Image: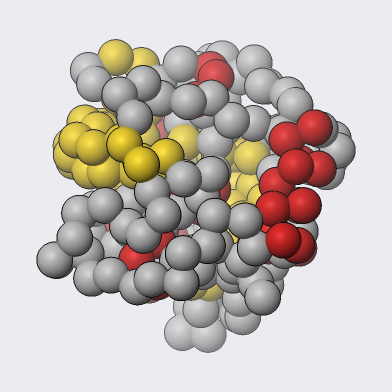
Amino acid sequence: MSDDQPPEDSKLTRSKRAWAEAGKFLTGRHARPEEERLPPGQHLVRDWPVLDLGSQPDVTRERWKLRIDGLAARPITLDWAAFMALPQKSFVSDIHCVTTWSRYDNRWEGVATADLLALVEPRDEAAAVMLHGYDGYTTNLKLADFAAADALLAHSWEGKQIPREHGGPVRLVVPHLYFWKSAKWIARIELLGADRPGFWEVNGYHLRGDPWNEERYSG
């Protein structure tokens, strides 16, 4: 599954760490998603920028597996066939990157996170998840954010398989939070009893990451 090695200290990592220290891009505004579609400090793009930590693991569908464990009554490991046999959902959502770009109306297909949680039955004490990528990346989410109505583990975007550079074969999509929370190349979902920081959160980024409250950085 995941090599479980920390991502390399790439140029992007160093730059984004410096942005957190300087509070770059902060506007100080708050907005409500029901009133403003574009969060504070964001600008629209038509393409889909590629951002990673210096590596793009080549995980074939044949080799891909997803482990869901931790505080789960029924931990499971899914291969590609088992994943695709689960109920499939389709959502259209906007995405917002902490580097200030946003892209409207992305069409995703995959498995709803709520359906995955129903499958593994989180224990009563489960309060958060840690997402682990095949590249060693980690990021945390409160359980309620992970289980949002339009959150899913996506295998397709705009009717085609999600390409490797964007996290294929399977990535998380949680549209109401900054996109660093939507981990690429997903390998493991670990249910936790308490929230704890992942890779970017240790490097100065907000534990939750709400774009409309401009929760870019921990400070």
Image position of 160 with respect to 123: above or below: above
Residue at far bottom of view = 125
The residue closer to the viewer here, 107 or 136, is 107
Locate residue 120, reporting x and y percent.
Answer: 43, 60
Taking the spot 86% from the left edge, 38% from the top edge, the residue there is 9
Res 6 quadrant in image: top right
Q: Is residue 75 rendered to the left or right of residue 70?
A: left
Residue 108 visible to an observer of this rendering? yes
Which one is nearer the viewer's eye here, 213 or 9? 213
The answer to whether 200 appears left or right of 163 in the picture is right
Quick check: 96 above or below 59?
below
Where's residue 49, x and y in %?
48, 25
Image side of residue 112 versus residue 89, left or right: right
**Is residue 141 placed above or below 199 in the rendered structure?**
below
Asked whether 97 or 72 is in front, the reply is 97
25 vs 66, nearest the viewer = 25
Where residue 40 sits: x, y (%)? 36, 60
At x 81%, y 33%, the residue is 10
| Numbered marks: total | 0
